[in-house]
Image: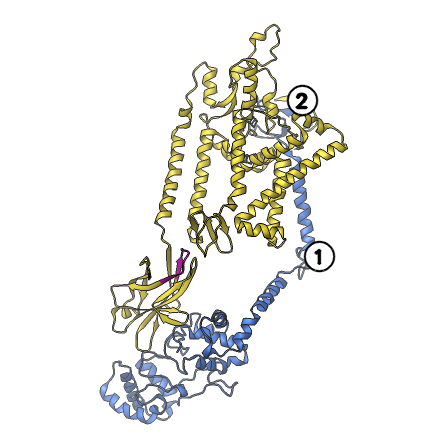
Amino acid sequence: MTQSPASPPSLYVAREPIFPRRVKGKFRTLKWWIMGVTLAIYYLTPWIRWDRGPNLPDQAVLVDLAGRRFYFFWIEIWPHEFYFVAGLLIMAGLGLFLFTSALGRVWCGYTCPQTVWTDLFILVERWIEGDRNARVRLWNADWSLRKVRLRVTKWIVWFLIAMATGGAWVFYFADAPTLAADLMTFSAPLVAYSTILILAATTFVFGGFMREQVCNYMCPWPRIQAAMMDNDTLTVAYRHWRGEPRGKHIKAEGADQLGDCIDCMACVNVCPAGIDIRDGQQMECITCALCIDACDEVMERIGKPRGLIDYLALSDEEAETQGAQPRPIWQHVLRPRTILYTAMWSLIGVALVYALFIRSDIDLTVEPVRNPQFVTLSDGAVRNTYTLRIRNLTAEDRDFRVMLTSEEILRIDVESDGAVANHVTVPANETLQARVYVIARPQDAAADAETTDLRLWVEDVETDDRAGVATIFNGKG
Amino acid sequence: MADKQEIDDVTGTDTTGHEWDGIKELNNPLPRWWLWTFYGTVVWGLAYTIAYPAWPLINSATTGLLGYSTRAEVAERIAEVDAQNAELTERLASADLATLAPDDPAHRFGVAGGASVFLAHCSQCHGSGAAGVQAAGYPNLLDDAWLWGGTLEDIEYTVRHGIRNETDPDARWSEMPAFGDIMSDEEIGQTVEYVLSLSGQDHDAAMAEQGMVWFQEQCSACHGDNGEGIRELGAPTLNDAIWLYGGDRETLIETVTYSRFGVMPAWGQRLDEEEIKAVTLYLHQLGGGE
Ligand code: SF4
Ligand code: SF4
């Protein structure tokens, strides 16, 4: 430990402003494309129409909270099928594990909404206030009419983007064209407006002012990711052995002793996290790869090979320092660990697709009434009551026959609106509750047995599609 | 905190000066906005306890400047729902149950509401599943045997006026004499053998033959010639499988000797019109309604 005579350190610090410079290069181009595609998906998806027939909504992606349905193109998820959502979440988790162990924080660098929107906000900032140097000057300048004008313009554009972001979100929960019209005429539900405002406010603050602070202090993901990276993970790194000792390449004595890094600070100036990648891997780095682009540009100009800053595994950096060859990329990517993640990911994916194909569009649950277990009728017959829930997962009303199979002789009566019948009509896209009586005559074995196995069935009158559930009959025994 | 700042050689960060077993805490300062957020939550918390009920006093708690109360909110919600249902309630209260269609909204409203009325007022005797208490005199309301009739009209009358109570002059009333004062034990025994034979149970045929004479003399006026019961009198059917107090020899002897006297309150005096109609509809659709 070194002793230094300074005053006690402060426990709190203000945010250091960061002014990322514009950069050109292959990763920047890739990021523009990803930004375009992800934003387009987000803003446009609710407007895609999908015809499901007269009884169902025609919005391709819709979370119908009141009706408790989730529509996704040709798939319709009911609350009892929530395991599909759980499965997708597990897949998303495993997917992140896979990408992180192979490519580090590539989620953070390219596709995280925080990164995408911050990128968009910085783009706006650059249009209005100029590139890095102009922005630094403006930051340091005293308040003037020009500064106010630039700031206010920037905030207004940010705010419009933020409103559009919050606005797009609510369209996922209601019919988009109707809701849009309602929003315009101020007749939409209050919760729609408050949701838009809250999301607009968070977008505005997170994208405009918090930026890297969200990643450094608020988001749990980078801490988890740090635990999932290893020496083989490809991540953005500086070739120390090649760059050092750094220095300006002026024709002075000893210039030929210097490494390739000319200490131009290009990599630092473009960094949205405000760090120097030459200090090694750091908590703040979101692996956005912009410093690679910046450095490559410089290397090109001074006639040195690209890749002073590059996607690099820690093990490669070590090998290269000792003069050995780095391992090929596929060896870094194809490791037992990534293969295991891929296998798990695919397994769940296949299971979900399988479940989707075998699921029936009728669903039956049977709940025997247990209070009381049975009723004796005046002629000595024994009656059990069951509550049936029949879900019609199709867009048409359907007629179902209700039947039972059992080794014993039993009679079935279905109650439908007060009358006894042997079939029920379940409206489209609804669940119907019906009461069913099963009766054993006094002379039947089931009347005196303790329990008798039986199976209740519903069968579509037209298509003969059926669903059955096993249950028991309680006798006097 | 140490006066002198220490710099950790590895990270170049200063330390807080706190040391545990040689491990020193690095000073990675928190962002200041975090601190302000924390102060913000403290202010919010205090303001909340002023605006809403919070601080405990001896008998109650501070009521808060906004005058909010969860009870008042519940009362408000109930009033709201009542107002929403006012039309249905009115329709149900004035409905003629016999002609109210099962798919009428008022009918559905009644069945659903009747379930609550039943649980609150009737389940103490008849059980939460309406199965009564077997052999203890609380009738099962799910089966097809009715002492006083199982049509909507009959059920509504029974609910409204009750049975054998002193409070309602229109209560259903019938009384079985205690035959222990009228007949000898032997005669009662013989009568019971006959009654057992009516429902096909094991019995002593010789005694039953004599019992039949007593039955025709003493019992058939109310219970019918073949024990089929007479509803207008509330006299139970004796030739079926259902017994309110039990159908075995011993219980029957007890019943005939001492008689039984089950009562039910007149709910017309306690429940609203729509509650009576609702519970009637509920009972009628439990599986035994006629
Ligand atoms: S740290 Fe969190 S918020 Fe930042 S880019 Fe990564 S996932 Fe997104
Ligand atoms: S160090 Fe490079 S990769 Fe990391 S955040 Fe900064 S610019 Fe992006």
Q: Colour of chain B?
A: blue
Q: Quadrant of residue A13?
A: top right
Chain A color in figure: yellow
Residue A402 visible in the snapshot: yes
Which residue position holds label 2? A4
**Foreground pick, A235 / B236:** A235
| Residue A46 position in % (x across, y down) | 52, 46
Q: Nearer the viewer, mark 1 or mark 2?
A: 1
Above or below: residue A318 compared with residue B201: above
- Quadrant where the C terminus of chain B lies? bottom left
Q: Amino acid at mark 2?
A: Ser
Residue pictured at 33% horizontal, 78% vertical: A378
Q: CA distance from mark 1 to mark 2?
A: 54 Å
Neighbour tally class for label 2: few under 14, some 14-19, many 20 plus, Cα within 10 Å: few
Magenta residues?
A: A389-399
Q: Secondary structure at mark 2?
A: strand
Residue beneath the point at 67% across and 45% down: B42
Q: Amino acid at mark 1?
A: Leu
Question: Residue beneath label 1, please?
Answer: B65
